[in-house]
Image: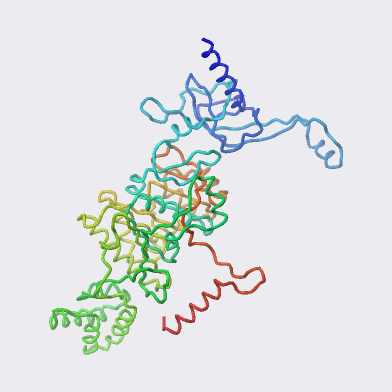
Amino acid sequence: MFISNCNLVWKGIKLVRELVGVIFGDTSPFEFKFAVSDAEIKRGDYIRVLHNSIWVLAQVEAITRSSDVISLDAAISVAMGKRISDTEEKVVAKAVTIGSKDKNDMLVTPKRPFSPGNKVYIADETLIKKTLGLSSGRAYIGILEGTDIQVRLDVNKMVQQHCSILAKTGSGKSYTAGVIIEELVEREVPLLIIDPHGEYTSLKSVNRNKKDNLLMSKFGVLPRGYDSVVTYTPSNLALNTTADEVFRLDGFNPSAKLLSQLIPSLTSTQTGVLYRAVKKSSSQKEFYSIEDVIAEVDNDFSNAKWGVMDALETIMNTGILSENPTTISELMQKGKTSIIDMHGVDPELQDIVVSMVCSELWEARKIGRVPPGMLIIEESHEFCPERGYKKTMSSEIIRTVASEGRKFGLGLMVISQRPARVDKNVLSQCHTQIILKITNANDLRALSKGLEGISSELEEEIKRLPPGVAVLVSGNIEIPILVDIRVRKSMHGGESINILDETGSKSKDEYGSILTSIFRRSEGV
């Protein structure tokens, strides 16, 4: 009996300590106001109210502070130097209801309005996790804003149901993508990353950034690099020194269809020249190359041959076609992360590479030739743009993966700084959306049209997000939440380059860019 009474006393003391206010005025099942008794309460905090014998979770939406003493006249007097000893400040908070879980683990909201006079308490971790749906998941991406609760996503659902990471430049888009990729790499999910700017090669390196290292204890992580990451370049190893391997397309008996895809600007007459040359090459040799096709084009009777020859020679000089091509089975393996680093590669060639790689991956996955995994496309607005912006070869296959990939175990992650320019059919298929700060009006409108759960209030929140904080919308989490994205374990490769150092002279990075440019010109690139 004594122990039982002690427990009741302790619970009473604990509730008193957690008490933050009392409900007053008009209420509804969906929102209420309360007089704040704890000055530490702030916008975004999670609170709880005992309603009809059930703890209901709510969130502070707004806080106002007022004073009957400090009127306009009094404020003018204070500005002129008069002192007022007692301001009698009143702090009022507005809260919106999130709800509670029923016996079937479904989120439900109250049927009746909250009662004025009910006490409001700080929500405990158990109630927050259970109500929001944060109790499961293995991919640790950060901390629920304003709490110490870790936010973890279900890896299977994130991969199967696709994911998007959207933000304006400099808001942490690539950094956040790196965090997600680290979690997938550690779980040996096969990954193929389309990397236009070479930002993800740094996954191989341990994070030595001093600022990041100071934050690691906060997030409970340790620095590490990932040996399973292999970088391929469609260029060459002399120009792309961070790459591990070259990436090549199959140049063995190149078909007219393949070559015409590599030269999308051909006229109908030039296409005829190309098809005749390929037909002659295939009829004369069992094994032929692009050089053989060029020789047959040279023998053609049409004046249109000169443009075709020039285009074919340009392709040949890139070295992208090879008798020893990079196979999709090499790129997509369990426990391996393959990066196609395309910085320094012509945009048209990038589009061709993405189109062919995605098509081959899609066909290979449908017949089970490669394991289930995820395709990650950085700068996705360049490869699957919204209709009306521009045409790309890769758009159609990316739309197909977005709409049908779940059936075949091929996930898609799209990353972009311009949501308005990403194909809406692709974005709408992403059931996990991680959105950092966006201020462009067109991009915000695109979010509300293309993604579920984006309200006008949430749009305003997105415009005000600090760096490193993201809105997370997921089918596995009951409401959109704010997440403080965890620190990277591996080195971040997407940092902006400092143009000038402290003395005003050129930085090492700028000199490096100049030297690279000179080298490329000397090589005819």
Left or right of 178 in this view: 367:
left
The quarter of the picture where the C terminus appears is bottom left
Residue in front for this viewpoint, 393 or 178: 178
The part of the image, by quadrant, that contains residue 253 is bottom left
* Residue 507 appears in the picture as rendered: yes
Number of numbered tags placed on the structure image: 0
Vertical comparison of 488 with 36: above or below: below
Vertical comparison of 488 with 106: above or below: below
Q: Residue at x 51, y 57 (%)?
A: 168
Residue in front for this viewpoint, 72 or 399: 399
Vertical comparison of 292 with 453: above or below: below
Q: Residue at x 45, y 35 (%)?
A: 132
Q: Position of residue 379 (x, y in %)?
A: 43, 61
Q: Residue furthest top?
A: 1
Q: Position of residue 402 (x, y in %)?
A: 32, 53
Q: Where is residue 221 in the image (x, y as percent from the top left)?
A: 48, 48
Vertical comparison of 27 with 46: above or below: above
Left or right of 311 in this view: 517:
right
